[in-house]
Image (cartoon, rainbow, N blue to C red):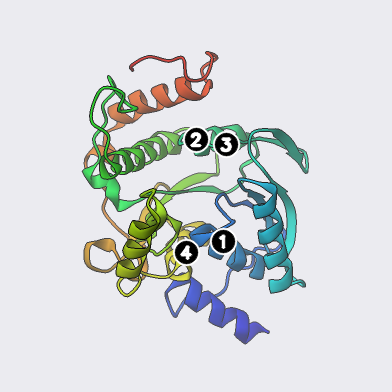
Amino acid sequence: MVETVAGEAVDALGWEHLVPPDLRGRTVVVTGASDGIGRESALHLARWGARLVLPVRDRRAASDIRGLLDGERADLVNVAGVVSPGRRETVDGFELLLGVNALAPMLLTESLLPVVRERVVLVTSHAHTSGRMDHDDPHFRRTRWTLPRAYSRAKLTAMLWGLDLGARMPAGTQVQLTHPGWVVTNLQNASGHARVDRLVTMASRPLAMTAAQGAAAVLFSLTQPLPPGSYVGPDGWQHLRGRPTLIRRSARALDRGEAARTVAWMRREVGLDGTAPGRAGPA
């Protein structure tokens, strides 16, 4: 049993010298756990004894992931709750309010800060390096929308939020940011055209990492001793593939003034500043 778990730790964390983390007695909230990197992360966390709360998009997805976890390691898995969006639900004394939109991770995380005891891991992307903020038109209502521009802006937004959040975390806790790398997941099915999606997936599969490999950076950020506010990603070319290590972020992602401005806009958008969500104008 010990040898099996140790082998899984090596595969999951990417480094042969790392010992398996003991997460018994700890509760981990994993978003996006119904598929891809989130699901692989949840599987390993369960194997290592973590108690899981899994916000997912619908009840079918909740049933699927719970069944998978129960069948994976019934002796170690303890799913404290699997909750779906668009409603308030209580899991072991703390309330989750979940919504499906680009700002949902912020709303969820900021709402849970009073019960965070160790760390928050934000999954972002090295695509943030090409991102540009436009506070006069953050939703591309007047400027041309493209998938790469929107994606890189969203990831830069997450990096700036993480920078700001790190300075506001409760004493004894920390934020870590992670870039999984180039991974074959449902993100390849975002064009809206089934044939294009299939071609993109086929082209990506020989070059990109699997979801299990992509989860390594997430698990590394969550379980290993790191300086607060670290940015972790693959160590290979352009940080697309490889083993998790500390990597550099863009200069824009280190701009604290821009971070404060961006987070003020985000808080207005989700109603955390006391106004009605979505009623905010330009920052």
- Relative depth, front residue between 214 and 261: 214
First along the sequence among labels 4 and 2 = 2
Report the Cα–Cα distance between label 4 and label 2: 23 Å
- Name the residue that disc number 1 marks: 39
- Give the crowd class for mark 2: few <14, some 14-19, many >=20 residues within 10 Å: few
Q: Nearer the viewer, mark 1 or mark 2?
A: 2
Q: Amino acid at mark 4?
A: Ala
Q: Quadrant of residue 1?
A: bottom right
Estimate the spatial distance between the alpha carbons at disc 4 and disc 3, rounded to whole Å. 21 Å
Tag in front: 1 or 4:
1
- In the picture provided, is 78 more to the left or to the right than 203? right
Does residue 81 appear left or right of residue 201 in this picture? Answer: right
- Which residue in the structure is indicated by mark 4? 215
Q: Based on the displayed image, in which of its 4 quarters is residue 245 positioned?
A: bottom left
Q: Amino acid at mark 1?
A: Arg
Res 156 quadrant in image: top left
Compare residues 149 and 161 and report the one nearer the observer: 149
Q: CA distance from mark 1 to mark 2?
A: 20 Å
Counting residues from the start of the chain, the first of labels 4 and 3 encountered is 3
Question: SS of the residue at dot 2?
Answer: loop
| Relative height, residue 246 to residue 172 (above, below) | below
Residue under label 3? 108
Which residue type does callout 2 highlight? Asn
Judging by the rendered image, the residue that carries numbered circle 2 is: 101
